Image (tube, helix red, strand yellow):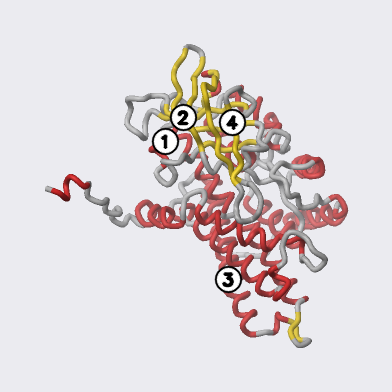
Amino acid sequence: MKLAYAPADLAFRDAVRDFLATHATSWPKRSESMRPGPDQIAWQKLLISKGYAARTVPEVYGGYGAAPDLIKSRIIAEAFAEAGAPGGLQNQGVSMLVPTLLELGTEAQKRRYIPPTLTGELVWCQGYSEPGAGSDLAALTCRGEDVGDHFRINGQKIWTSSAHVADMMFCLVRTEAEAPKHAGISYLIFSMQTPGIEVRPLKTMTGQAEFNEVFFTDVMVPKDQIVGERGQGWFVANATLKHERGMLGDPNAAAARLRAITAILQRETVDGESLINNPLYLDRLMRLQARVLAMEANGLRLLTAAQKGEPAGLSNLIVKLMGCELNHQLAGLAIDALGELGVLYHGGPHEVDHGIWQHRYMFDLGLIIGGGTAQIQKNIIAERGLNLPREPKLAKPDAVAR
């Protein structure tokens, strides 16, 4: 077995590195907004034109159109992490809806929605969770009444990321009132400017309003804006959730963070000695480095399975749980390494990296809950991945009384 890159692979790596060096002054700055700015959109379009983003999305839908290639995907990820360069856009539209539409959307939906979504010009939010249907998503009650050519939607969603800046929503709605709860759900897409939609931002401990409540009052959605079949939204939703977990546990993002934290440990000192030489910090760094490497290896396993058209099984189920916890611990190490400066946030002359590590630490704690809590993820891993017995359900009160 040869683990070294072939000459053609090395030439491709050199081309990626040259591109990043040439365009270093064009890298977009980190934005506080959840909506891509003009510089991010321009960067995304450039990356797509070179095949460094949307690489395998067909050209007809606005992608680069390359065949899946495990080695090239790895080389691109390594080069961007090594340079500390921002990669392609990762958001609910690009990372979750686009692959769902490629798999299950109609030709008209693909041509209409994928190109502007890939470039960041069309921003999406996800209407899944409700006040009474979070971890038990199939218990949702937001309803869509059949009124001829439209569904009339009434109900509420909560924890809707970026709804306050989004153009569109992909939403789960109960359209078949008499069907069992996992059936009777439809997956609809519609404009956030549709009359009857009200968005109320929810401020989190980061000081920002990343999440929202969304209320629907007689919202009219055409029936041709359904993805998949009517009443089969649970199947479509699970396809999207699979891509969401991959986005939240992206090993390439973790590798980039690890490099940035290593630089902090090399730069920060205590009594004139670099923190990278402190045994306690070095031990924490090496433990996290081992986990990042493990996640990268698991990412290669997932790419291999996808290329072969094989189910990823347990390898896919662990991504969200392990990735979100790892990112939170990486941010924690960065804050500790900054010492007294690690508490500074939201401006000030001594703030480091614009407070990004403090924001990540707080936001990533929320991601351990969002997108399926850690406890739910462990149940999924145990039951679906390891074939362990299902968690016993609590007895109903009337059964206990008898």
- C-beta proximity under 8 Å, tags 2 and 4: no
Q: Residue furthest bottom?
A: 271
Rendering quarter of residue 213: top right
Secondary structure type for disc 3: helix
Q: Residue furthest left?
A: 402
> Image point 54% across, 46% down: which residue?
306
Residue that carries the numbered disc 4 in the rendered image: 198
Residue 21 location (% of width, % of height): 85, 57
The mark found on residue 290 in the picture is: 3
* Residue type marked 4: Glu
Label 2 neighbourhood size at 10 Å, few (<14), some (14-19), many (20+)?
Answer: many
Query: Which comes before the other along the chain, label 2 or label 3?
Result: 2
* Residue type marked 2: Val
* Residue type marked 3: Ala
Residue that carries the numbered disc 2 in the rendered image: 173
> Image point 56% across, 59% down: which residue?
365
The mark found on residue 140 in the picture is: 1
